[in-house]
Amino acid sequence: MNEALRNIGAWLGIAAVIFLGYSYRGELEGVKNRVLGELVPSQGATLDEASISFRESRNGHYQIKAEVNGQWVDFMLDTGATSIVLSPQDAERLGYGAESLAFTGRANTANGVIRTAKVTLRRLAVGPIAFDDVPAIVNGAPMSKSLLGMSFLKRLRTYSVNNGTLILRK
C-alpha cells in the first residue's frame, strides 16, 4: 500500500510539473532566450516581438548572427561602415558569386580603397527583426567577417548600447 501511495504521489508530482511548465511556457521561453543569449552572445536574447539584445564579445565588438536569404551569416556590428557589407565568402555562399557581380563601386576602408558590387538581400532577419529587399554590397577584397553597417541601424526605430549590452528595436 505504501508503494502504491508513493507511485501515485510521484505521478501527481510529474503532472504538477508538466502543468506548471505549460502554464508558464511564455516566461520559460524568455528564460531560455536569456540563457542562450549569455552562452552564445551572437545569437542574442529576444526581448519581445520587436527587440533583441546582444552582449559585447570578448574582443569588445558586437557579433550578430543573422539569417540572410534563409542562411545564417555571422556579422560584426560596425557603425563606421555605411552599408551592410558581405565578405566574398559569405556572398558566394548566399549565391552572389564574384563572376556574376559587377564590381563598379569603390569604398574607402582602413585597408585602402576596395572595389564593391551592389546586391539586394531578399530577407535579412536578426532575431525578431526582419527586413525584405535590403540593399548591401559585396566587398571585392577578402575580409574575416561580414559587417552590419549604418544602413541596417537606420532601419531600426532605435538602438542603444549600455553597460556592454546592445539593444536593437524595430
Image (cartoon, helix red, strand yellow):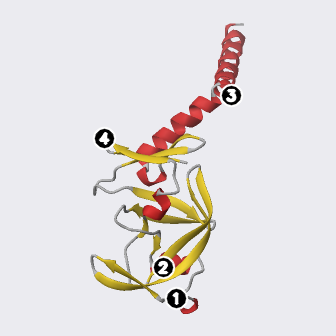
Badge 2 vs badge 3, beta-carbon distance below 8 Å: no
Q: How far apart are the two marked residues, 4 and 1, measured between alpha carbons?
A: 40 Å
Up-down relation of residue 144 to residue 61 (above or below):
below
Q: Mark 1 points at which residue?
A: 98
Image coords of residue 100 (percent x, y): 58, 90
In the displayed structure image, the side of residue 156 where residue 55 appears, left or right: left
Q: Mark 4 points at which residue?
A: 163
Amino acid type of disc 3? Tyr
| Residue 92 can be seen in this image | yes
Image coords of residue 49 (percent x, y): 60, 42
Q: How far apart are the two marked residues, 4 and 3, measured between alpha carbons?
A: 34 Å
**Nearer to the camera, 86 or 41:** 86
Badge 1 vs badge 3, beta-carbon distance below 8 Å: no
First-in-chain label (2 vs 3) = 3
Q: Name the residue under label 3.
A: 22
Amino acid type of disc 1? Ala
First-in-chain label (4 vs 3) = 3
Q: How far apart are the two marked residues, 2 and 1, measured between alpha carbons?
A: 9 Å
Residue 8 quadrant: top right
First-in-chain label (2 vs 1) = 1
Q: How far apart are the two marked residues, 1 and 3, measured between alpha carbons?
A: 50 Å
Amino acid type of disc 4? Asn
